[in-house]
Image: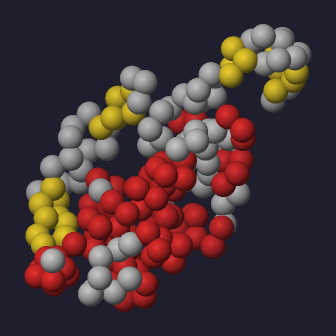
Amino acid sequence: MANLLNQPEVLKKAKEELDTSQVGQDELIDESDLPKLHYLHDIISENLRLYPVAPLLVPHMSSADSTVGGYHVPARTMLFINAWAIHRDPTLWDEPTSFKPERFENGRVDQACKLMPFGLGRRACPGDGLANRVMALTLGSLIQCFEWKRVSEKEIDMAEFTTITICKVEPLVAMCKARPILDNVLSRA
């Protein structure tokens, strides 16, 4: 939400995707709508690229001598993958510190090698699919049901601190107002 509030044009485009082209203003977003909401998924991918929940992926141990990126890695070496650094690497990403969901439109990014907020391969997080569905339903519902604004004209501070996970230094404070769809849905319930 903080990224969307700092870039209202992205929030507007996501709202238009939900309101006009895919879900409508009569029904709440449902899991069956998710495959049609490409821009919403682009927003989530871009947010996970910039702010992966865990900056370091689960450690791995090499089972045999190998070479990674030109470096010799002896067998039984503990390997840490810094997803945060990979996701912000200027050799892999154009404008790596900018929030630009459009970079994921139409599958333009080879996500299999560059984007890894849940790890890769057979040791990737088994909750990846569930997490992506829950994030899409939650964010989609927040966009569909409320008008969002910053509490001041000043951009929201995106400073972060890292422990095992990445968190915002300052919690998000925002203003919201119910949209008409919320009244429609609640009156039918």
x and y, in percent, of residue 182 in the image: 16, 76
* Residue 6 in sight in this render: no
* Residue 69 in sight in this render: yes
Q: At 34% from the left edge and 55% from the top edge, which residue is drawn?
A: 3
Q: At 11% from the left edge and 57% from the top edge, which residue is drawn?
A: 151
x and y, in percent, of residue 19 in the image: 33, 84
Q: At 84% from the left edge and 11% from the top edge, which residue is drawn?
A: 74
Q: Quadrant of the C terminus?
A: bottom left
Q: At 65% from the left edge and 67% from the top edge, which residue is drawn?
A: 107
Q: Quadrant of the N terminus?
A: bottom left
x and y, in percent, of residue 75 in the image: 83, 12
Q: Quadrant of residue 183?
A: bottom left
The correct choice, above or below, for 141 with respect to 150 in the image is: below
Q: Quadrant of residue 58?
A: top right
Asked if residue 54 lies left or right of residue 70, the reply is left
**Number of marks in picture:** 0
Q: 117 or 132, which lies in front?
A: 132
Asked if residue 186 lies left or right of residue 130, the reply is left
Q: 21 or 30, which lies in front?
A: 30
x and y, in percent, of residue 124 in the image: 63, 39
Q: 10 or 15, which lies in front?
A: 15
